[in-house]
Image: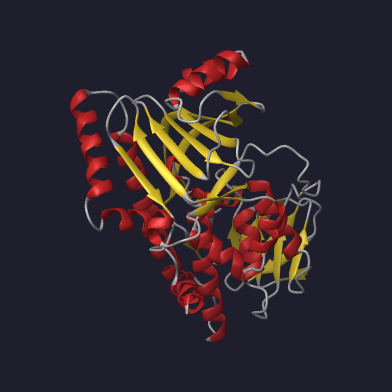
Amino acid sequence: MQSFDVVIAGGGMVGLALACGLEGSGLRVAVIENHPPQVPFSAAEPHALRVSAINAASEKLLTHLGVWSTIKGMRASAYNGMEVWDNDSFGRITFTAQERNLTHLGHIVENNVVRDALWQKASQLRDVTLLAPATIKKVVWGENDVFITLDDENMLTARLIVGADGANSWLRSHADIPLTFWDYEHTALVATIRTEKPHEGVARQAFDGESILAFLPLSDPHLCSIVWSQPATEAARRKSLEPADFNKELAVSLDVHLGLCQVESDRLTIPLTGRYARQFAAQRLALLGDAAHTIHPLAGQGVNLGFMDVAMLIGEIKRLHREGKDFGQYLYLRDYERSRKHSAALMLAGMQGFRELFDGNNPAKKLLRDIGLVLADSLPGVKPQLLNHAMGLFDMPKWLEQLQVEDAL
C-alpha cells in the first residue's frame, strides 16, 4: 500500500496544474489518469479542435508553474483585440491591448498543448507520482485517511483526494455530492477554419439571435478555431453540410468580416450543459474544474475558472500545511469551497444572463442589447472593468495576485 498526502483523480489540465503547484511543499502527490498523452506534440500536426482562451490570470499561474514558456514554444497564439457585435444591428463593443498599454489580452491554446506541457513538467518532479494508465475502482473515506483501490487492485492512502476528473466526475458521484444541471439548449460546433483575410490577432464573436459564433485566432494568420453555439438541430444540419455550403453559411454568419471561409478539419459537435456541484469540498475531498462546474463557452472562461480553483487550492493546502493543520479536514477546506463557489456562481449567473439577453430577435430585446453594447463601449470606466473580468484579474487568490504585483515592479 502506497501512502500519499494528496491524490488527484484526473490528469487533465487542472489536475496536473495542482500537482505541479504542490511541488516543493514537502507533500507527496499522486495523479491517477486512465488516458495519459500517447503522442508527443508536433508542430507539423494540424491544430486540435479543442482550444481554450487562456487569460492573464491563468497565464500568471502557468508561468509560476514553470510551463508557460514550454506552451508558447509548442504552439500558442496571442490575441491583442476582441470584437463583439449583434448581426444586422448597430450594437458593438471592441477591446484592444493597445488602449490598456498591454502586449496582449490572452492566448488561444490547444487543450492538448497545455496538458502535454503540464504532463511533461509533472513527470520530472520529485514529489509527484503519475499513475497511468490507471482507474479508481473504490474509495473509502476514513477519519484520518482516504483509502483508494485501483482497477489493478493496488491500494493507496491519502490525507486528501481531489476530484479533477471532468464534468461526469466519478469521484463526485461516488461521494454522493448533488449536482444542479441545466440544458443550455445549444450545441457547440467546433472546427478549424482558413479565412480569406488575416485575423490580425483579434478574437471575434457575433450574435444573430439564434446562435453565437466565435472566431478564435490561431498561430497561422489565416487560421481560426470556431465555436458555433446553436440549437442542436442546426448544429446537426451544419455538421452534415457539404464543405462549400458550410463555408458560405459560416462567412455570412460572421458578416463576411474575414472574407470567404474554408473549413480545414472535421466538424465536431458538443451538447452544452451547465453544471454546479452543491458542494465543492467535503471531508478529505475537494472538487476542481469541470468536476465542480461547467459553463457556457460563449466567453471562453471555463478553463480559466478551473485554473483559479487550482490556484486557490494550492494556496490553501500550502498555508494549512505550513501551519501544521490537517488540510484534509472539511473544517479547513471550507474557505476554498466558499471562495470558489462564489466565483463559479457569479460566472454562471453572468453567462446565463448574457445568453438570455442575446437569445432571439424580439425587436425590443434587440434594441436593449444594442444600446447596452454601445454604452458599454463608450461610457468611461465600463470597458476597463469588463476587460479586467475577462482577463481574470478580479478572480485571483491573494498569493497569485501578489506575484502579479511583484512582477509589475
Position of the N terminus by quadrant: bottom right
Q: Is residue 36 left or right of residue 143?
A: right
In-front residue for pair 109/297 = 109
Residue 222 position in % (x across, y down):
60, 35
In-front residue for pair 129/359 = 359
Which residue shows up at 49% across the image and 62% down it?
57
Which residue shows up at 34% across the image and 36% down it?
355
Which residue shows up at 73% across the image and 64% down it?
121
Q: Is residue 4 left or right of residue 356?
A: right
User: Exactly how many numbered labels are in the figure?
Assistant: 0
Quarter holding residue 22: bottom right
Q: Is residue 355 visible?
A: yes
Q: Residue furthest left?
A: 364
Residue 130 position in % (x across, y down):
76, 61
Residue 372 position in % (x across, y down):
23, 41
Q: Is residue 42 left or right of residue 209?
A: right
Q: Is residue 32 visible?
A: no
In-front residue for pair 123/50 = 50
Give the color scheme: rainbow, by chain, secondary structure or one colour: secondary structure
Q: Is residue 209 left or right of residue 132?
A: left
Which residue shows up at 32% across the image and 29% down it?
359
Residue 156 position in % (x across, y down):
73, 65
Q: Work out whether 222 lies above or below 300.
A: above
Q: Work out whether 191 lies above or below 318.
A: above
